[in-house]
Amino acid sequence: MAKISGCVTFTAKTEANISADILGGKITEWVKSNPFAVLEEKFVAQSDNYVSVLLFYSGQAGSVNPLDKM
């Protein structure tokens, strides 16, 4: 496991997420748009009304190659 460099949180109403898988689409889009971030840990928290997914990552978020900044 590498050093954690960031966290991103996705939240949706539980009933809406059950019927439309809102979080799955949001997480997939984030992963596709951040190719230089490596997912290290995932946690899910749920209440009666909301579900949240916390993704901890290492590397660099964004679509710019970190080596291009050198």
Image: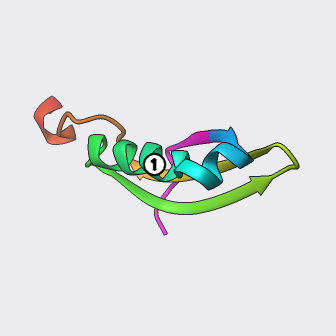
Lateral position of residue 46 relative to residue 20, left or right: right
Rendering coords of residue 59 (x, y %): 37, 49
Lateral position of residue 34 relative to residue 57, left or right: left
Lateral position of residue 15 relative to residue 24, left or right: right
For mark 1, give the secondary structure. helix
Rendering coords of residue 50 (x, y %): 77, 43
Answer above or below: position of 19 versus 40.
Answer: above
At x 53%, y 49%, the residue is 20
Task: Give the residue number, with chain letter if any, for mark 1.
Answer: 27
Q: Is residue 8 magenta?
A: yes
Q: Residue furthest front?
A: 19
* Residue 9: quadrant of the picture: top right
Given residues 41 and 50, the one toward you in this image is 50
Given residues 38 and 42, the one toward you in this image is 42
Answer above or below: position of 55 versus 40.
Answer: above
Please report the bounds of the magenta region as a residue range.
1-10
Graded by Cα atoms within 10 Å as few (under 14), some (14 to 19) or many (20 or more), the crowding at tag 1 reads some
At x 45%, y 48%, the residue is 27
Rendering coords of residue 36 (x, y %): 27, 48
Q: In the rendered image, which quarter contains the C terminus?
A: top left
At x 83%, y 43%, the residue is 49
Rendering coords of residue 35 (x, y %): 26, 48
Q: Residue furthest bottom?
A: 1
Lateral position of residue 30 relative to residue 18, left or right: left
Badge 1 amino acid = Ile
